[in-house]
Image (cartoon, rainbow, N blue to C red):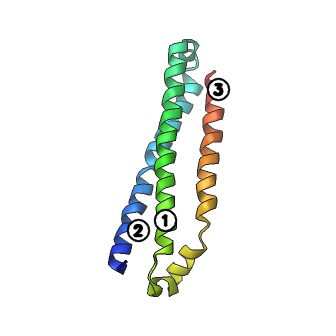
Amino acid sequence: MQESTWASIMATRSRAGNSLTLPYVILHSVVLVIIAFESAALDASSVQLALAASTVIGTLWLVINLDSVFADFDALTKDMSESVAASNLGRNWAKMPIGAMRVMGIVFSAVLVIVELLAIY
């Protein structure tokens, strides 16, 4: 793979990962605000179901997309040219614990969703 192609894909996937942060924060902030300040609205089972469904489905969508970004980072790290791999940035990329980051993203999101579901119900 040419370095320019590699760099372009890396930049594109980095932007994709960055673009997932704001929806994730907004989703869980809204859920937490509803739990904290509108707990009376949670007495209706339809509201509980809607909030729980949006939390679970939204989080799944975001985590799956972010996991694909990390999977692409892993593949791109293996496709680095020799000159990029020999650079300081390339050596940092090669040391990055992408597998651990993928696991932590899933585990942390699952814990957050479980805690929110417990608060909803």
Query: Along the polypeptide, which appears first: circle 3 or circle 1?
Result: 1
The residue at 64%/34% (across/down) is 114
The residue at 51%/87% (across/down) is 86
**In the rendered image, the vertical position of residue 119 relative to residue 89, given as above or below:** above
Q: Is residue 21 visible?
A: no
Q: Is residue 31 visible?
A: yes
Can you identify the residue that label 1 sits on?
73
The residue at 58%/56% (across/down) is 102
Query: Along the polypeptide, which appears first: circle 1 or circle 2?
Result: 2
Q: Amino acid at mark 1?
A: Phe
Q: Amino acid at mark 2?
A: Met
Contact? badges 1 and 2 (CB < 8 Å): yes
Where is residue 22 drawn, in percent x and y? Answer: 44, 47
Where is residue 103 drawn, in percent x and y? Answer: 63, 53
Query: Judging from the image, what secondary structure is the residue with disc 2 in?
Result: helix
Q: CA distance from mark 3 to mark 2?
A: 39 Å
Can you say which quadrant of the picture contains the C terminus?
Answer: top right
The residue at 45%/87% (across/down) is 83
Depth check, front residue: 77 or 121: 77
Can you identify the residue that label 2 sits on?
10
Question: Left of 106 or right of it: where is 82?
Answer: left
Depth check, front residue: 30 or 73: 73
Query: Along the polypeptide, which appears first: circle 3 or circle 2?
Result: 2
**In the rendered image, the vertical position of residue 89 relative to residue 49, given as above or below:** below
**In the rendered image, the vertical position of residue 91 relative to residue 14, given as above or below:** below
Can you identify the residue that label 3 sits on?
119
The crowd level at tag 3 (other Cα within 10 Å; few <14, some 14-19, many 20+) is: some
Q: CA distance from mark 1 to mark 2?
A: 7 Å
Query: Judging from the image, what secondary structure is the residue with disc 3 in?
Result: helix
